Image: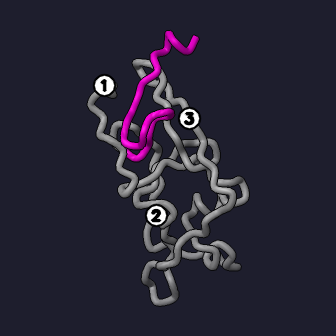
């Protein structure tokens, strides 16, 4: 992969989350994740998923062909993982019967080449860096 050609981060297009130990991409600005369940009228629910406190950023090193790419991701607490994975608001998450979804959850496996929403550590937002494998041994 040629990381010199990566697009600069754009946090308005999406964020990287650490969801059950996996870096996942969610389109849209944090914390505006909208429920995907259908309401009784058949339309998509417009409620947002709850935010969590404390809000924690995790630093991740992703192996690449040229070394390690260091990114930052929002860590979803263990207590919120099932709700976030399903992308359901609190009402639909707590419903006695699982809701039908208007569309599938929008999570995607994070890929630094196609998801420009991560940023490198120790650099101003908007910059990327690669740490060569030889310097991490």
Query: Left or right: where does residue 50 sit relative to residue 45?
Result: right
Which of 136/88 is in front?
Answer: 136
Image quarter in which the N terminus is found: top left
Q: Which mark is residue 104?
A: 2
Instruction: Residue at 69% x, 75% y: name it.
Output: 94
Q: Residue furthest bottom?
A: 41
Instruction: Residue at 64% x, 72% y: name it.
Output: 93
Image quarter in which the C terminus is found: top right
SS label for mark 2? loop
Instruction: Residue at 50% x, 33% y: name it.
Output: 122
Mark 2 Cα within 10 Å, few/some/many (few <14, many 20+)?
few
| Residue 114 rendering spot, x and y as whole percentages | 33, 42
Mark 1 Cα within 10 Å, few/some/many (few <14, many 20+)?
few
**Nearer-N-terminus badge (1/3):** 1
| Residue 30 rendering spot, x and y as whole percentages | 48, 60
Whether residue 128 appears in magenta in the rendering, the answer is yes
**Nearer-N-terminus badge (2/3):** 3
Instruction: Residue at 44% x, 78% y: name it.
Output: 44
**Nearer-N-terminus badge (1/2):** 1
Find the magenta span and give its range.
Answer: 116-137
Q: Which mark is residue 2?
A: 1
Report, in whole angstroms, how far the alpha carbon at label 1 lies from the one at label 3: 19 Å
Q: Is residue 61 above or below residue 82?
A: above
Q: Residue furthest right?
A: 79
Q: Nearer the viewer, mark 1 or mark 2?
A: 1
- Which quadrant of the structure image shows residue 26? bottom left
Report, in whole angstroms, how far the alpha carbon at label 1 lies from the one at label 2: 31 Å
List the residue tagged with mark 3: 60
Which of 69/110 is in front?
Answer: 69
Which of 41/4 is in front?
Answer: 4
């Amino acid at each position: 992969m040629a990381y010199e050609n990566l697009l600069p981060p754009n946090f308005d297009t999406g964020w990287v989350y650490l969801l059950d130990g996996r870096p996942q991409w969610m389109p849209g600005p944090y914390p505006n994740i909208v429920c995907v369940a259908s309401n009784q009228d058949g339309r998509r629910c417009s409620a947002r998923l709850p935010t969590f406190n404390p809000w924690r950023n995790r630093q991740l090193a992703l192996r690449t062909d040229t070394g390690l790419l260091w990114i930052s991701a929002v860590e979803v607490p263990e207590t919120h993982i099932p709700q976030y994975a399903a992308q359901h608001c609190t009402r639909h998450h707590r419903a006695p019967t699982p809701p039908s979804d208007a569309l599938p959850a929008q999570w995607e496996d994070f890929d630094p080449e196609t998801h420009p929403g991560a940023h490198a550590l120790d650099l101003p937002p908007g910059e990327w860096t690669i740490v060569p494998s030889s310097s991490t041994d």
